[in-house]
Amino acid sequence: MLEYLDWGKRNRMRQIIQSDGRVLMLAVDHGYFMGPTTGMEVPAKSVVPLLPYVDALMLSPGILRTQIDANLSKIAWVLRASGCNSILDEDIDNESLILTALEAIKLNASAIAVSIYVGSEHQHQTLKNLAEAIADASQYNLPVLGVTAVGKKLKDKREKRYLALASRIAAEFGADMVKTYYCEGFEEVVAKTPVPIVVAGGPKLDTYKDVLELTYQSIQCGAAGVDMGRNIWQSDYPVAIIQGVRAIIHQNYSVKEALQLVESLQTEENKRVPLFVETQEDLEASKIH
Ligand code: R5P
C-alpha cells in the first residue's frame, strides 16, 4: 500500500496510517472556527489522557505549539492549514490557507489538512486552497488530507452521491487522504475515491453504541479509520469510548465486543469532569457542522 508515493511522503503517511492499514485520528481542531468548543476549552487537559490511544492528532498550529509537549513522540501531527472564518459568519465556507507547508514541516507535522466546501458559495475558493496547498506541500513530500466539509447550509448533504463527488474531487487534485462523512452506501464513496479515507464523527451521537456502529460500518465499508472528535471528547467517558473505537479499528472488534469494553471502562477515574459550566446553548453551537 502507498508504494506509489515518494519515500518521504510514504514515511510520513506511515506515521499516520499504521502497518495494518488503519488509523485512529483524534480531531481537536474545532476551535479554528468554533473557539473554545465545549469539551475542548483547555485542549491540553482534554487531549493528554487520550494520547495513549491515538495514532494521529488533528489540530491547529497554535494549539500544537501551546498545548502539546514537544517531547512527545510516536504521535503524528496533522495540522489544520485552512481557516479564516468563524461560526459568527452566515456560513463557514469562506476559507483561505492559514499555514504554509514549510511552517508545518518546522512543526514536525506528518500532514496538513485543508477543507473543501463543494457546492457551497465559496466552492471555487476552497478548491483553490486545496490545489495551492498540495503544490506547496509537494515541495517537502508532505501529505495533504482533503477534508470534505459541509458547513451550515449544506449540513444535510451527507449522502453518497454528494460525498463521492467531493471526495473524488479532493483525490483528483492530489490529496493523499480524504476525510469525509459516513453515509448509507458508503462503500461506493470508498470505491470511487482512490486514496485512503478517514471518517469524521460529526456532532455528538446519542449513545456509545451509535459511535461504535459508525466506526464499525466505516471500517467494513473500506475506510482506513476515523478522524473523530466530539463523539470522543464531549462524551462522559472519553478514555473509555476511545478505547472501544480503537479496538474496532485495530483489533477488529465487533460492536458488541467494543461496547462491552467501553462499559467495563466507565469508571469514576475515567469520567470526564467538565472544566466549565456546559450550557445547552454551547452544546448546540458545537453541532453546527
Ligand atoms: C472541524 O471542526 C474539523 O474538521 C473536525 O476535525 C471534524 O469535524 C471531525 O471532528 P468531529 O468528529 O467532531 O466531527
Image: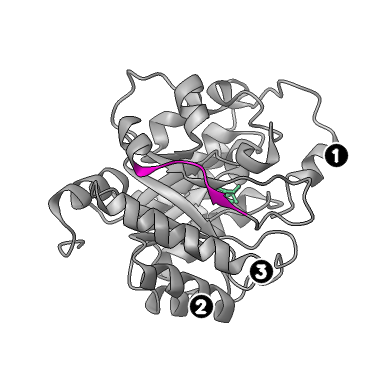
Question: Does the magenta portion include 99?
Answer: yes
Q: Earlier in the sequence, mark 1 or mark 3?
A: 3
Amino acid type, callout 3:
Ser
The reply to whether discs 1 and 3 touch (Cβ–Cβ < 8 Å) is no
Tell me, for residue 165, which label it has, or none: 2
Q: Is residue 231 left or right of residue 164?
A: right
Q: Is residue 125 left or right of residue 249?
A: right
Q: Residue at 45% of width from left, 73% of height from top?
A: 169
Q: How many marks?
A: 3
Amino acid type, callout 1:
Gln
Closer to viewer: mark 3 or mark 2? 3
Closer to viewer: mark 1 or mark 3? 3
Name the secondary structure under disc 3.
loop
Q: Quadrant of the C terminus?
A: bottom right
Query: 36 or 273: nearer the eye?
Result: 36
User: Does the residue tagged 1 have its C-beta within 8 Å of any atom of ligand 1?
Assistant: no
How crowded pointer 2 is (Cα within 10 Å; few <14, some 14-19, many 20+) is rated as: some
Q: Earlier in the sequence, mark 3 or mark 2?
A: 3
How crowded pointer 1 is (Cα within 10 Å; few <14, some 14-19, many 20+) is rated as: few
Residue 135: % across, % down: 33, 57
Visible in this render: residue 181? no
| Residue stretch in magenta | 95-101
Tell me, for residue 280, which label it has, or none: 1
Q: Can you identify the residue that label 3 sits on?
A: 120
The reply to whether discs 1 and 2 touch (Cβ–Cβ < 8 Å) is no
